[in-house]
Amino acid sequence: MAFDFVFWVLAVIAVASALLVVLLRNIFRAALAMILCFTVIAGLYVTLGADFLAVVQVLIYVGAISILIILAIMLTRDVWQAGRASVVGPVAAIAFFLFGGALVIGLSRSRWPAYTPPNLPPGEGTSASLGFEIFSRSGFVLPLLISAAMLLAAVIGALFLIRDE
Amino acid sequence: MSVGLNHYLILSAILFSIGLYGALGRRNAIVVLMSIELMLNAANIALIAFSRYVASAQLAGQAFALFVIIVAAAEAVVALAIIMTVYRSRKTVEVDRINLLKW
C-alpha cells in the first residue's frame, strides 16, 4: 500500500512537470521543470528495483545533460521568450491526443504475462548482476565498445562543430 | 487495484505523448531537444518496467536502458553543438526560421 502511494505521487509529479516543460513560455523555467521530471523518474526507477540506473539517471540526466541545456539557454539568451504563435501547434495537439489516446487505450487493454516480482534481498543491489549481464559471454560487450567509440566521436564532432575558424 | 506493469506502461505512454507534443509543436530548438529527452526517458521507464515485471530473472531490460542513456548523452552533446553553431551564424534557434535547406 505504501508502494502504491509512492508510485502515484511520483507519477503525478512526473506528468505535471513534463507538461510544464512543453507548455511554459519561459524556456529557463521549462529547463527547471525538466530537471524535476528527471529526478522524479529516478525515483520511479527506485520503485522498479533499478537502483544502479536511478544513480546513473541522477548523474547523467540531472547532473550533466541539464547543465548542458541550461548552458545552451544562457548562450542563446535573447530568445528566451517565444513570442509568435506556432503554426503547427494545433497539429501537434491533435497528434498528442490521437497518439497518446491510442497508446493508453491499447496498453490498458493488453494482458502481458506479468507476475508479481520477488523483492530484492536487503543489502544486495542490482549493480553486480547488471555487470554480469553486460560483461558475460552472451552479454553486451560489443555494444559497450561501440558506444564508447560513439561517445568519443560525439565529443570530437561537437568540438569540430563549435570551433572558431 | 494495486500498481502493476500496466500502470508503469501507461505512465510511460503519457510522458512519451507529452514529449511528442513538445517536439512537434514548439519552435525553440532547445525545447524540442528537452522534449526528445523526455521521450527517451519514457521509453526507459517502459524498458525497466518490463525488465522488472516480465523477465525479472535477467536484467537485459536494464542493460538496454543503460545504452539508451549513453546514446541520449551523446545526442544531447551533438544537438547542443549544432544549436550553438546555427545560433552563431543565423542569430536564431527557432526551428521554423532555420530553413536554409528548404526549397
Image (cartoon, rainbow, N blue to C red):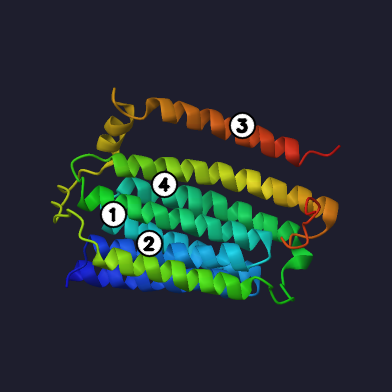
| Circle 1 residues within 10 Å: few <14, some 14–19, many ≥20 | many
Of helix, strand and loop, which one carries label 1?
A: helix
Tag of residue A153? 3
Labelled pair 3, 4 in contact (Cβ < 8 Å): no
Residue named by callout 2: B12
Q: Mark 3 lies on which chain?
A: A
Residue named by callout 4: A56
Q: In terms of depth relative to the viewer, which is nearer, B65 or A94?
A: A94
**Residue at position x 57%, y 59% from top?**
B34
Give the spatial CA distance, label 1 vs label 3.
31 Å
**Residue at position x 68%, y 39% from top?**
A158
Labelled pair 1, 3 in contact (Cβ < 8 Å): no
| Circle 4 residues within 10 Å: few <14, some 14–19, many ≥20 | some
| Circle 2 residues within 10 Å: few <14, some 14–19, many ≥20 | many
Q: Which chain carries label 1?
A: B
Answer yes or no: is residue A24 visible: no
x, y percentage for residue A15?
A: 42, 71
What's under tag 4, amino acid-wise?
Val
What's under tag 3, amino acid-wise?
Ala
Q: In this view, does B19 lie above or below B75?
A: below
**Residue at position x 17%, y 49% from top?**
A120
Of helix, strand and loop, which one carries label 4?
A: helix
**Quarter of the figure with residue B7:** bottom left
Answer yes or no: is residue A3 visible: yes
Residue named by callout 1: B49
Image quadrant occupied by the N terminus of chain B: bottom left
